[in-house]
């Protein structure tokens, strides 16, 4: 199981309020991704990289928005 990936996804979901289904669609075009991972399913390394890249990008966008909003 990809426990580190699941932990990272769970933290992101808690930060954003996204559902697992919506996250999977946005991050990997697969609404069942999170449920499958939590059910013990595997993920291709390319998909894992895509998901982690999505999380990093969204966090960076939020950080930029927060800095810009705080400066205004």
Image (spheres, rainbow, N blue to C red):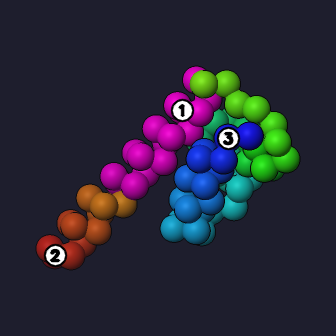
Q: CA distance from mark 2 to mark 1?
A: 33 Å
Return the residue found at the far right: 39
**Location of mark 1 (residue):** 50
- Looking at the image, how many numbered discs can be counted on the residues? 3
Whether pointer 3 and pointer 2 mark residues with C-beta atoms closer than 8 Å, the reply is: no
Mark 3 neighbour density, 10 Å: few (under 14) some (14–19) many (20 or more): few
In the displayed structure, 29 sits above or below 45; it is below
**Can residue 26 be seen?**
no
Task: Quarter of the image for the C terminus: give it.
Answer: bottom left
Q: Residues within 10 Å of mark 2 (few under 14, many from 20)?
A: few
- Residue 57 point in image, percent of width and height: 40, 45
Stretch of the chain drawn in magenta:
46-61
Q: Write down the residue under mark 3.
A: 2
Residue placed under numbered mark 2 in the picture: 72
Rendered image quadrant of residue 48: top right
Which type of secondary structure does the marked residue at label 3 adopt? loop
Q: Is residue 51 magenta?
A: yes
> Viewer-proximal residue, 66 or 37?
37
The picture places residue 33, in percent across and down from the top left corner, at 74, 42
Residue drawn at the location 76% of the way across and 32% of the way down? 42
Q: Where 44 sits versus 55, above or below?
A: above
Q: Quadrant of the N terminus?
A: top right
Q: Left or right: 3 with respect to 8?
A: right
Q: Which secondary structure type mostly characterizes the magenta part of the structure?
A: helix
In the depicted structure, whether residue 42 falls above or below residue 39: above
- Residue at the left extreme? 71
C-alpha span from label 1 to label 3: 14 Å
Mark 3 or mark 2, earlier in chain: 3
- Closer to the observer: label 3 or label 2? 3
Q: Which of marks 3 and 1 precedes in the sequence?
A: 3
């Amino acid at each position: 199981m990809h426990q580190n990936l699941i932990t990272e996804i769970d933290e992101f979901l808690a930060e954003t309020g996204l559902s697992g289904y919506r996250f999977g669609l946005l991050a990997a075009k697969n609404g069942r991704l999170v449920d499958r991972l939590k059910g013990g399913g595997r993920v291709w390394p390319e998909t894992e990289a895509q998901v982690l890249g999505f999380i990093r990008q969204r966090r960076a966008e939020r950080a930029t928005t927060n800095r810009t909003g705080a400066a205004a």
